Amino acid sequence: MPDDLPSALPPELDIDLVAAERLPWFKRLLARGLSKALDGLGAQHQTSWAQGHTDGYLNGHGEGVREGYADGHLDGVEKGRRMLLIRDTRPEAHRGPQVEDHLFDDWRLPLSTELKKRIKADVEQKLPAHNQPSAAQWKLIFSDTPSTCVIAGAGAGKSTSLVLRIVLLVHYLGFELDSLTVVTFTRESRKDFIARLKQVMALWGHELSDRQARELVRTFHSRILPMVRSLPGFERLQAFETLGSASPASEDVDSNPFDLRINDAQRQQLNLCYRDLYAREPRFRELIAPLCRQARQLRELERDHPDVQKRMAVTELSAKRDAAWCDTVEGLWRRAGAWPIEGIEPSRQTVQINGHAFHLHGYAAELDAWVVLGVDDSENREFKRPDAKLPLWAEGVIKRTLFQAFCAQPVIWLDSYQAGRQLLASLSGQASAGPGFEYKVKGELASAPLLDCFVMAAGFIENLGLDVADAVARMSFASDDSDRCFFEALSLFWKAFESQLLDLSPPVMTYNRMFALFGEHSPENLTQLDDQALRPLAHLLIDEFQDVSPQIVSWLRASLREIRRRGPAMHVGRRATYSSLLCVGDDWQSIYGWRGSSPHYFMAFDKTFSAPASSRVMLSENYRSHQYIIDAAEHIVRAAPAIPGKKAKACGAPQPLTPVVILERDDQLLVDKVQAHYQQGDSILLLYRKGSERQRLPEALQTLLQNDAAQARRIRLLSYHSAKGLQADTVFLLGDCQHLTQSPSKNQLYRLAGLGEAVDPQAYDKAQQDEVLRLAYVAITRAVRQCYWFIDGQEEAKGPRASARIAADQPFFDDRRVAAGAQA
């Protein structure tokens, strides 16, 4: 509303006029008379006219403005609305297109409805009834997207489905064999799959030779080797893992990725590298010294230990005789030519033990440790010093125990001439013996020779897709933590070792190094491969994908990205074009995390292998075990993170529902049960969790195993891990699945590899706690009809264990342990 409307008369007309009704009566009469006179004369009273005109103007103009403003405001709002509707809302800032980072082109397998019907009819005709695919298996076979993830539980019958997938690609779609690779996890599973593939392909008229089948069906290791050998200068490259094997030059030779044993040829190379590095690198020698000292020095005994309490009583007497005892022992060492030892200064210094002086034999300056000589086992066990009541070795046992409990100085006790020679070799860096001592990285279950520890630690780091030197540089330890010295020494050693292997003729390289050469950190190396070397990775079918390592994932992603980059030119004149990936696995069966594998990449498949379209297939049928076996195993493993929606259903021949029987470890009961099932004609798996279980196997069962090996071969003794992929009528489990340790170094490395929660300081330990549940699942699901689980009730529960998930109130468990109620 405008605020400038006139509200009064102009100044020149501003006269104070009074209405006639308000005048006195005589003035009112006079005004009426004058008014009539003016009307009669037709005259105008100027002031009255002006005031009337102004009042009319004020009232009329004001009302007009108000009405006009209201109408105009409405019109203006409506016009404004129309302006808002057509306003340009495009962003002013320039934005370019996003980068599409798929590993595959957007394509589909050309599978028409008619072709699918034809294939199904052929399969129905050529395969027996028990090998006919289920609806879910047909979904696997007919998947037409570039990437396919298949969740296949235990006993799901995936092998036949994979074989029929190959029949589809080769026979019906005309894919060339050299554009395909089927990856199996172990040499044994590769052998079985090749036999099955040749048998089924022959039914469709494709007689594969052994060589063709081996070229098609590979392990990851046997596939990477020819890729590296295709590079100039590496035509005769040999894998370190096959060094010393019978046929090292063959491309078909591949190692068991989980066989950690080091043979003589491999150890020779490790020792040579150690010798040379120890001689030329002062920092390496500095790092080895505390490791050697820790490995060799006396292990501490608690002062309340029964042996310590018993021998404390003779401390004073032992100290009085110690000088003579030291003289006698040193004389034996000199006579054997084992003393003095180069690098150890003979010195009869003393240390105080509970206020009494005991003698030392020498000092190793490089190790900053004192040395005491013990009695070698080759000496006469009855030999005594003059006037001594105890044999010489028994006097040494007393002294050793007192040192273990009360000596504050670092002491190396050499209890044999061989130990002396090993220490000499260690101090001099001799190649023939290597370091000559063992080491135990925190978190490992047992100590091992130092170079074996180097190989295992480097393998774990590289399996995680990390470079050893870079990973070590990003780790941190307390200043007095011996693992700090271990990992720095590893960093120096591994770089020198890889260089040494490449200098051999022919050159040698670890498999992990080969994968790293063609991984995502160095994709430029893939550009040096010709199409023929890269083409077998165009269409991949991978089994047991849940146990893949980050290193392998990086290699696969880089290879698929390079195939896509090369485009159609790579496939000119061929039926097999583009690229595809079909992975089969079961996160519940991922049991190799201790080697650096992880189910993470399988559980996050679509994110790991980005594609414009992907398929997921769930194979829930179990054709091996009855429902109670399945339910018992799944009840234990469900506490671990898993792909949602998993629940297996028994689909094999009907069987009696017998629960998993839980028993206290009883050797005689074990023998009776095994013999009873063996006499019934059952196939049997005896599975153990720890090597000590194998050692304590009753003699009657050892005899049965030996006799069976020469005859029926119906009973096998294997570890839980080794039994994966196998089955038997009856399975006996020996020992609990338990997470026993914490690993600070592996926790760090796990985080560096991006595994686990970023804020979780114990990511690896948490993964291992889940893995013990999965290991129990794998072991139980080997059983077709019956499973017995013997658990040692006397064994101390040091950490999370699978048996804690046993539910005695469930029908699929029969817990017969004495304390079953309490444990449940």
Image (cartoon, grey):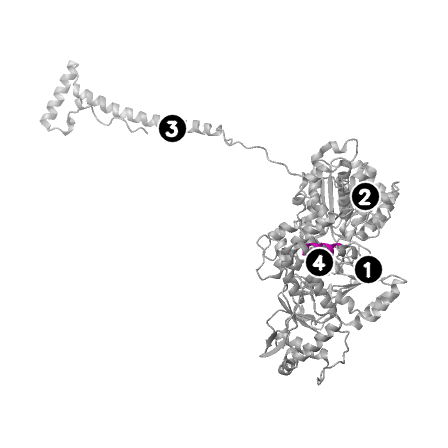
Numbered badge on residue 216? 2
Q: Does the segment drawn in magenta span residue 271?
A: yes
Query: Considering only order in the chain, which callout, 4 or 1, is on the residue closer to the N terminus?
Result: 4
Q: Is residue 30 above or below residue 672?
A: above
Marks 4/2: CA distance?
A: 36 Å
**Pointer 2 or 1: first along the chain:** 2
Mark earlier in primary sequence (3, 2)? 3
Residue behind mark 1: 728
Q: Secondary structure at mark 4?
A: helix
Residue type for callout 2: Leu
Name the residue beneath numbered marker 4.
451
Tell me which amino acid carries mark 4. Answer: Leu
Say what amino acid the circle numbered 3 marks: His
Q: What predominant SS class does the magenta segment belong to?
A: helix
> In the rendering, at what x and y percent does residue 81 appear?
45, 29
Q: Which residues are magenta?
A: 269-278
